[in-house]
Image (tube, helix red, strand yellow):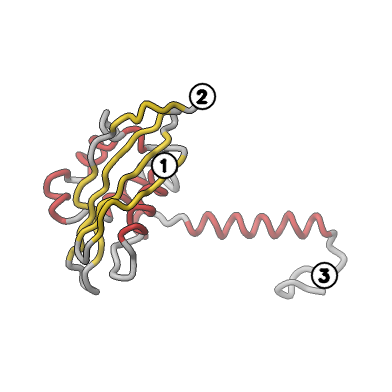
Amino acid sequence: MTINGVFSARVPAYLMALMLGLVLSVAKAQEAAPTDQLLKPSPERSAREVVTIQLDALSDNDQPERNAGIEQVWAFAHPRNRVITGPLARFTRMLRGPGYAMLIDHLGYEITEIRRTGRTAVYQVKVLSRDGGFYRFQWRLEKAAQADGPAWMTTRVTPARQTGEQLS
């Protein structure tokens, strides 16, 4: 028996499993796009998906390189938001500051839709920070003109508010 014409039946099962794991690890590493291949706004993405992409990126902020998560969030910042919070270096300092630092390398999140219309969406996001505290944010999005059509982009994220809950 061969797999992709390379492995024969004489390869022990544990070795084949190890090799398969290695192949999958390499594939996963290749999925982690460098900053020039960040996910981009698209008419096909839902507002909730945009929030999820941003939160997932921030949960492992420095992969595949330092501040890659923050750069991914920036990729979905609405043009009006960029004017207020940019350039990227300033945006990075803001996210590492007291109002948003708990988003960096957070341990988990919960997204609840508050309101959604055809052009705007508002979500409440509850984050479990690496310090064990829970923080609440409000994520606002609007559709913005893109080359391939209107796409959801973040217009505002409120600074964190502690919920009073703590993971013990």
Local packing at callout 2 (Cα closer than 10 Å; few below 14, some 14-19, many 20+) is few
Earlier residue among tags 2 and 3:
3
Which amino acid type is marked by label 2? Ser
What type is the residue that disc 3 sits on? Ser
**In the displayed structure, does residue 77 sit left or right of residue 46?**
left
The residue tagged 3 is 8
Question: Residue 107 at what x, y percent from top left?
Answer: 46, 38
Answer left or right for 115 relative to 165. Answer: left
Q: Residue at x 12, y 45 (%)?
A: 84
Of 134 and 99, nearer the camera is 134
Mark 3 and mark 1: Cα distance apart in space: 39 Å
Q: Around disc 1, counting alpha carbons within 10 Å, would you say few (fewer than 14), some (14 to 19), or many (20 or more)?
A: some
Q: Are marks 3 and 1 in contact (CB under 8 Å)?
A: no
Above or below, 52 against 151 in this view is above
Q: Nearer the viewer, residue 2 or 157?
A: 157
Secondary structure under tag 2 reads: loop
Of marks 3 and 1, the one in the foreground: 1
Q: Earlier in the sequence, mark 3 or mark 1?
A: 3
Residue receiving disc 1: 62
The residue carrying mark 2 is: 168
Mark 1: which amino acid? Asp
Q: Secondary structure at mark 3?
A: loop
Q: Is residue 79 visible?
A: yes
Front one among 132 and 40:
132
Task: Indicate the secondary structure of the residue bearing disc 1.
Answer: loop
Residue 133 location, quadrant: top left
In the displayed structure, 107 sits above or below 37; it is: above
